[in-house]
Image: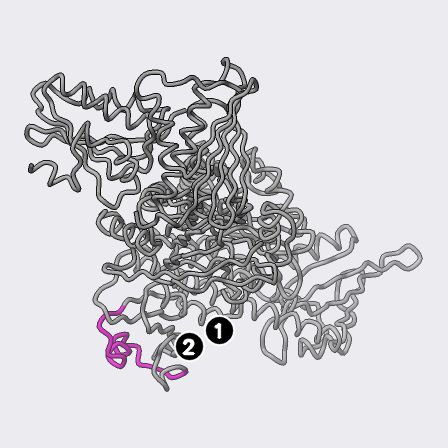
């Protein structure tokens, strides 16, 4: 179907070129080229029959051997095939009706052409035939016009006079020279036999009424022994009111007549050409009034030729398309620009069908005479396009919804970390989905950061993104090393059967020390924005996830200088076809380095500078983080007196203790004792209201001091286990003091860290 | 709001293996206890509770271990614990004498085979 549409379009284009008056040789060259392209052959020849019909002149072609073009071949059409040694041949006559110009041939290596190919090359032949015919007529028009001007300047007028009876009494020298004869009443004898009767009839009518006499007829021209058209005008003469005869002049109008005839023929062959082309065609005059539509047009609209003349075609345009169709048409005509428009035109079935209508200004003999246009029925293509667009739009919407639901716009706050994230969906088509960012608090007190980009777009990519994001959350919790996390997910993807590929930057950050370890699986390098300037973390590079099996994944480590921010992003931010990645990374570093203030400002600045106002071809995910180290020596917290406060308290303690370098067991034991004290505070808090407790921890020179204060009073052992909490505190701390007063209870604990590591 | 903890159950012949992961404190201790008690059918002889994956147990959680041992004992069912010797929880378990409530094994296979 695509081939046929393309071939039909090609023929229409060719016909349009011919109608615009493209020079014949150029048209033939173009025809040879498009036939080669549409039929997928290397060799095409356009052969013109010589005047005597005894040979074929190779007038144009593609891929012909040296010496063939311009030469004359015997009229046997298989001769060229033998010469070219081609396996198959397809040909068509170039001509309209009985007027033959020649033949067009295509030679292929493969066997066979289809019926559609034959129909196509036949159409080309018909178009070229009509064009060749028209070229001959146009030549005639041009020639006769020039000759007419020349003659008008040089030919002396032919003059004659008659008496009252109508007998010729005088002819001038010009007349004598033209006709080669002298005077005589039978000057009608010099007229062409076919015109004689008409001439005499007019003459007798005029003389009877003594009116002006006027006739165009063919007069014998002595020098060429041929007849030439003249316009004869006789004027009655009166002397003192008495009719005395006629005085007349004859003007040689032969060239003008010839030109008019040629023009008529040219127009006729133009219309013939238009009817030959397998498309709808029309012409207009300079005012945009339709002067002609071809049969193709009438077949489509089901109207008559007369109905289509003038401005009435606009009535057939679909009401929704009418305004733009006519306004663009008027605007194009005002500047004599080519015009093209897709609109719905009423079909004879009553249905509106999409057509593409193209018009171009038309010139005859250098004079602008209006427009010529072609229209092609593109209804099937257009409806399919619209349906596809709807499907794309729907998928885009679903993909965006899915993407948004899988990728929260705001990440949950992470203690000790300033965070900002952005997701920008791609604007083009269904280019959405597949990019993500994530932040995860690991049990060891470090934070894992992920930015990834699943190859492809749409629903599948968005769904894969959701799976990968969760896989990273899962493995990120249990695996310590970034390369191990990435390797495990590669294994997961490779064993999944589905073809998923993704680039990922996975990085684990120690908020207190600024130490990072990271792995970049086919992903662009993260940017560190340090106080002394930006730089990229270039290490830890390996292949994307899902690209290779087995695959090697690497990791690298670095330390962020205090006060640094870290920017992770997907390649939609930096990838652009016309600029090298290196240059884009430089731009990114410069933009990020120049941004002051918070991370939201950083993201906005980077988006504004690096992406600018341009449309996003790909979606972009951005994640900016800045570690906010605990003061290192002291923490002071006020927490609600309820069991749910214990988990966040442990999270906070983990960070603090991790920073002190305490062993895992020490961290557990200190956390446990503080939480036991906190648990007692919660147990004894008064009332259901906004009771709180306070925790303070300080660490200095290997010694940790913690206090937990509440507003209640501790009861002594209630049941056996109640005392276990306090006994744990006493066992695990070097020193414990419990102070009670009317305001509440305060537990003060002290422990040296590092001493019992071997325990 | 309670602390995050998971229990994974696995029937191995006459034994039920329960792997406890996450954090157990006063916010979720009684829930964990109820789930573990409910996980023991009458025909099971032994509950092997693997706490290797536990990041945090507080005194309430330790009390659950004692309570669990008592309840199972009344049903003639045994409680065994699995905890690797390098666990950060080791010293606290010793101090609270958890082994008096349930024997502690270094790994799951040992706990099941003895």
Task: Give how far across and how far down residue A621 sits, in percent.
Answer: 48, 48
Q: Residue furthest bottom?
A: A67
The chain that hosts pointer 2 is A
Tell me how many marks there are.
Answer: 2
Q: Is residue B21 above or below residue B68?
A: below
B18 left or right of A206 in image: left
Side of A306 where A188 appears, left or right: right
Q: Chain of mark 1?
A: A
Please identify the quarter of the rendering in which residue A593 is found.
bottom right
Residue A81 part of the magenta-drawn span: yes
Assess whether mark 2 and mark 1 are in contact (beta carbons under 8 angstroms): yes
* Residue A634: image location, x then y, percent: 54, 42
C-alpha gap between disc 1 and disc 2: 8 Å
User: What residue is rendered at 80% in x and 64% in y?
Assistant: A247
Q: Residues within 10 Å of mark 1 (few under 14, many from 20)?
A: few
According to the image, label 2 marks what residue?
A: A59
Q: Nearer the viewer, residue A272 or A386?
A: A386
Between A249 and A702, the one nearer to me in the picture:
A702
> Which residue is the extreme one toward the right?
A240
**Upstream in the sequence, badge 1 or badge 2?**
1
Q: Secondary structure at mark 2?
A: strand
| Left or right: A343 in relation to A719 | right
- Check if residue A396 falls in the magenta segment: no
Circle 1 — which element? helix
Residue A120 x/y as whole percent:
35, 59
Residue B30 vertical position relative to residue A523 in the rendered view, above or below:
above
Residue at 59% of width from left, 45% of height from top? A600
Decide if residue A628 is on the left or right side of residue A176.
Answer: left
Residue topped by disc 1: A25
Hey, which quadrant is residue A144 in on the image?
Answer: bottom right
Q: Which range of residues does the magenta coloring cover? A: A70-89
């Amino acid at each position: 179907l695509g081939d046929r549409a393309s071939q039909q379009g090609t023929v229409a284009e060719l016909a349009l070129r011919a109608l615009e008056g493209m020079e014949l040789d150029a048209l033939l060259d173009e025809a040879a080229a498009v036939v080669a392209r549409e039929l997928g052959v290397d060799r095409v020849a356009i052969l013109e029959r010589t005047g005597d019909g005894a040979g074929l002149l190779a007038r144009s072609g593609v891929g012909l051997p040296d010496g063939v073009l311009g030469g004359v071949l015997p009229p046997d059409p298989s001769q060229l095939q033998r010469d070219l040694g081609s396996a198959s041949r397809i040909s068509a006559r170039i001509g309209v009706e009985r007027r033959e110009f020649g033949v067009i041939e295509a030679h292929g290596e493969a066997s066979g052409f289809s019926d559609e190919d034959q129909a196509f090359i036949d159409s080309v032949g018909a178009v070229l035939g009509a064009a060749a015919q028209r070229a001959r007529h146009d030549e005639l028009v041009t020639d006769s016009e020039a000759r007419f001007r020349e003659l008008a300047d040089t030919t002396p007028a032919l003059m004659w006079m008659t008496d009252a009876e109508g007998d010729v009494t005088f002819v001038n020298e010009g007349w004598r020279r033209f006709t080669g004869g002298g005077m005589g009443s039978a000057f009608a004898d010099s007229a062409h036999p076919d015109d004689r009767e008409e001439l005499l009839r007019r003459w007798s009518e005029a003389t009877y009424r003594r009116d002006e006499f006027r006739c165009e007829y063919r007069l014998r021209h002595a020098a060429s022994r041929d007849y030439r058209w003249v316009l004869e005008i006789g004027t009655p003469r009166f002397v003192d009111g008495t009719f005395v005869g006629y005085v007349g002049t004859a003007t040689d109008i032969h060239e003008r007549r010839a030109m008019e005839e040629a023009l008529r023929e040219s127009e006729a062959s133009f219309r013939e050409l238009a009817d030959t082309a397998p498309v709808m065609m029309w012409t207009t005059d300079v005012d945009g009034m339709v002067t002609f539509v071809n049969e193709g047009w009438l077949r489509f609209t089901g109207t008559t030729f007369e109905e289509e003349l003038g401005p009435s075609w606009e009535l057939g345009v679909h009401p929704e398309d009418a305004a733009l169709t006519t306004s663009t048409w008027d605007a194009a005509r005002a500047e004599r620009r080519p015009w093209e428009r897709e609109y719905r035109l009423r079909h004879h079935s009553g249905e509106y069908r999409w057509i593409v209508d193209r018009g171009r200004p038309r010139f005859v003999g250098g004079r602008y005479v209006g427009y010529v246009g072609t229209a092609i029925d593109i209804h099937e293509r257009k409806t399919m396009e619209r349906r596809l667009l709807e499907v794309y739009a729907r998928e885009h919407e679903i993909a965006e919804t899915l993407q948004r639901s899988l990728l929260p716009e705001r990440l949950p706050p992470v203690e000790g970390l300033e965070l900002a994230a952005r997701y920008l969906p791609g604007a083009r088509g269904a280019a959405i989905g597949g990019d993500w960012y994530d932040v995860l608090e690991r049990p060891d007190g470090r934070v894992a950061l992920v930015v990834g980009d699943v190859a492809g777009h749409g629903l599948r990519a968005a769904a894969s993104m959701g799976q990968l994001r969760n896989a990273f959350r899962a493995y990120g919790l249990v695996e310590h090393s970034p390369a191990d996390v990435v390797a495990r997910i590669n294994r997961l993807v490779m064993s999944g059967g589905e073809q998923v590929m993704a680039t990922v930057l996975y990085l684990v950050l120690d908020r207190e020390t600024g130490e990072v370890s990271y792995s970049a699986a086919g992903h662009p390098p993260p940017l560190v924005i340090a106080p002394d300037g930006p730089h990229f973390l270039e290490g830890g590079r390996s292949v994307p996830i899902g690209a290779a099996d087995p695959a090697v994944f690497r990791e690298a480590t670095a330390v962020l200088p205090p006060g640094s921010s870290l920017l992770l992003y997907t390649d939609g931010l930096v990838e652009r076809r016309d600029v090298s990645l290196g240059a884009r990374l430089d731009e990114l570093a410069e933009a990020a380095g120049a941004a002051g203030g918070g991370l939201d400002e950083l993201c906005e600045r980077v988006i504004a500078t690096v992406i600018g106002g341009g449309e996003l071809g790909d979606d972009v995910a951005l994640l900016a983080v800045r570690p906010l180290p605990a003061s290192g020596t002291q923490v002071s917290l006020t927490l609600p007196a309820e069991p749910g406060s214990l988990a966040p308290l442990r999270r906070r303690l983990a960070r603090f203790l991790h920073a002190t370098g305490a062993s895992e067991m020490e961290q557990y034991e200190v956390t446990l004792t503080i939480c036991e004290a906190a648990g007692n505070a919660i147990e004894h808090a008064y009332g259901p209201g906004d009771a709180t407790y306070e925790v303070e921890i300080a660490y200095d020179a290997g010694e940790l001091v913690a206090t937990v204060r509440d507003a209640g009073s501790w009861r002594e052992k209630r049941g056996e286990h109640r005392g276990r909490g306090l006994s744990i505190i006493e066992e695990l701390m070097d020193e414990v003091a419990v102070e009670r007063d009317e305001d509440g209870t305060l537990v003060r604990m002290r422990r040296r860290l590092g001493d019992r590591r071997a325990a | 709001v309670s602390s995050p903890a998971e229990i994974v159950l696995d029937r191995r012949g006459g034994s039920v293996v329960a792997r406890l992961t996450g954090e157990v404190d006063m916010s979720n201790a009684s829930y964990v206890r109820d789930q573990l008690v409910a996980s023991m059918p009458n025909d099971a002889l032994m509950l092997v509770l693997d706490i290797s994956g536990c990041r945090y147990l507080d005194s309430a959680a330790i009390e659950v271990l004692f309570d669990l041992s008592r309840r199972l004992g009344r049903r003639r069912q045994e409680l065994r614990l699995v905890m690797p010797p390098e666990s950060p929880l080791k010293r606290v378990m010793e101090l609270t004498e958890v082994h008096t409530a349930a024997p502690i094994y270094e790994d799951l296979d040992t706990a099941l085979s003895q």
